[in-house]
Amino acid sequence: EVQLVESGGGLVQAGGSLRLSCKVSGFTFGVHNIGWFRQAPGKEREGVSCISKSRASTYYLDSVKGRFTISTDNANMVYLQMNSLKPEDTAVYYCAVDFFSASVKPKVTPASLANVREACHYSAMDYWGKGTPVTVST
């Protein structure tokens, strides 16, 4: 059974830092794209940062470039280090993995899954954690 469990969210002042962790199980770690997404109230879920199945490529949402860093332990953990947090970073953060082939995903092609930027979209991900809330106060 595939499982992803996030932790590390909380309340922080603007300019502060948090480190989110995602413990994964139930699949071979190094053969799937994996990443972090977030959803603020009333907004669509967006890809914040993803790392390719080879772990050689990463993607970051423009608004978090230079502030957030995704990493793994190459075993069963995925991290998101978030620095210089802003109130607009407030959201529930989810860890997700692209598990199935493109053939079973209506809006996804094999080429898009091979490109970490295109793969970092909620339509490409198959399994999700329950999320951890992050609130950044002014």
Image (spheres, grey):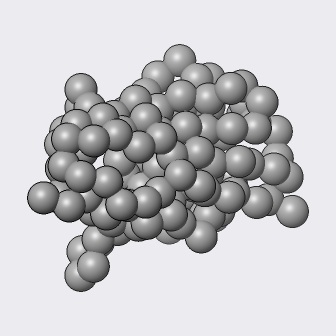
Judge whether 31 appears above or below 121 on screen: above
Q: Residue at x 27, y 79 (%)?
A: 41
Looking at the image, the residue that sits furthest to the top is: 56
110 left or right of 73? Answer: left
Pinpoint residue 58: horizontal percent, then vertical percent: 43, 28
Q: Residue at x 59, y 55 (%)?
A: 7
**From the image, which quarter does the N terminus lie in?**
bottom right
Q: Residue at x 63, y 48 (%)?
A: 22
Q: How many marks?
A: 0
- Of residues 63 and 88, the one nearer the viewer is 88
Whether residue 74 is visible here, answered yes or no, is yes
**From the image, which quarter does the C terminus lie in?**
bottom left
Pinpoint residue 61: horizontal percent, then vertical percent: 26, 42
- Of residues 84 and 40, the one nearer the viewer is 84
Query: To which quarter of the image does residue 53 belong?
Result: top right
Pinpoint residue 121: horizontal percent, then vertical percent: 40, 54
Q: Residue at x 59, y 70 (%)?
A: 130
Judge whether 5 appears above or below 84 on screen: below
136 left or right of 131? Answer: left
Judge whether 126 appears above or below 33 on screen: below
121 left or right of 42? Answer: right
Whether residue 112 is visible here, answered yes or no, is no
